[in-house]
Amino acid sequence: MITGLFDLQIRLERLDTNGDPLAKLDAMIDWEQFRPELKALRDKPRKSNAGARGYDPVMMFKAMILQSLYNISDEQLEYQVLDRFSFSRFLGINIGGKVPDFTTFWLFREALAESGLERKLFDRFDAYLRDNGFAARKGQIVDASIVQAPKQRNTRDENAKIKQGQSDEVRQAWSENKRRQKDTDARWTKKNGKTYFGYKNHVQTDVKHKFVRDYDVTAANVHDGKVFEDLLDGKNTSRDVWADSAYRSEETLKTLDALGYREHLQRKGCRRRKLSEREKGGNHTRSKTRSRIEHIFGVQAMKMGDTILRSIGILRARCKIGLRHLAYNLDRYTLLASPGG
């Protein structure tokens, strides 16, 4: 079959007619706002002027957003950019353009992780949201979810030393290849009778717009309350704070009172003291607002595979989870900022 001169244009127009979400995302986001931070990855001195110049960092960053939105591996990212018109158009790569290979994607994300740049990019867009009509309003909700990592098969002695903070000593005894496959940052925890190995994704969102406003990533065994105060947003227009019963303690209540917040923390009962009907009713009322943060975890789990990581170490975990939060906020912004959103 002979290819016509305008066949590609016709195909792309049909994508738009059928509602290509990436075209909408690309059109509504000012991607150049991220260049100042991303430029730092390219400001390293070159040993010589020989060889090809690196890929545009903004394009590579957009590729990381694609990967987060669709929960695909580096290998699949390369394949999908080659295969799908919507992906390549989103990245600004024409039919004859050069597509980065999966190793290039991996190296770029490694650079992000090592520099902690994903956090600066997240904060950059949060500032954009606040400056463009999406300030944090009507209070905030804090919650955490477990993100599983590849399970480790260590000896009892190795596990004991890792728990005691002697990870470096354990790693030195391993071969180079083994160290690359071993995660000494993740930890085991138990929830609802089940055990999990990995990290904990702590999130704070505003009630009005349901954007992720702040986050932290810790080992899975860190109690939710340990980072609770750090996540609170003093810029929110309301002093109301919602959280589940895991955050409720005398110390937390005193902290909230001292900081001038109004607590809406779920009550918890026990064998010796069960909740009264009034307390159960209060929990039900509070859960109507608190459940909004569960929608974020639900979207990320369904679209972005947020319940499991296939990476080693907390730096990579923070990078991947941070990029997922940023991708979620970018996607939600296109929904809310659209006419009738």
Image (spheres, rainbow, N blue to C red):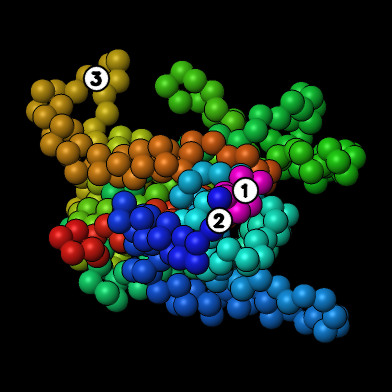
Distance Cα–Cα, label 2 vs label 3: 78 Å
Instruction: Please report whichever mark, 2 or 3, sits nearer to the chain's N-terminal start.
Output: 2
The front one of 84 and 39 is 84
Which element is circle 2 on? Answer: loop
Distance Cα–Cα, label 2 vs label 1: 25 Å
Q: Which residue is mark 2?
A: 2
Residue 124 screen position, x and y as percent: 44, 72
> How many numbered marks does the figure carry?
3
* Residue 77 on the magenta segment: yes
Residue 309 screen position, x and y as percent: 58, 40
Residue 70 screen position, x and y as percent: 48, 46
Which residue is at 71% across, 40% downward? 184
Which portion, as a residue range, is magenta?
75-83
Q: Which residue is mark 3?
A: 273
**Residue, far front:** 2
Q: Is residue 258 visible?
A: no
Which element is circle 1 on? Answer: helix
Which residue is at 52% across, 51% downward? 84
Residue 275 screen position, x and y as percent: 19, 23
Q: Which residue is mark 1?
A: 79
Mark in front: 1 vs 3: 1
Which element is circle 3 on? Answer: loop
> What amino acid type should be assigned to the residue bearing mark 2?
Ile
Distance Cα–Cα, label 1 vs label 3: 57 Å
> What amino acid type should be assigned to the residue bearing mark 1?
Tyr
193 on left or right of 177: left
How packed mark 2 is, by other alpha carbons closer than 10 Å (few <14, some 14-19, many 20 or more), is few
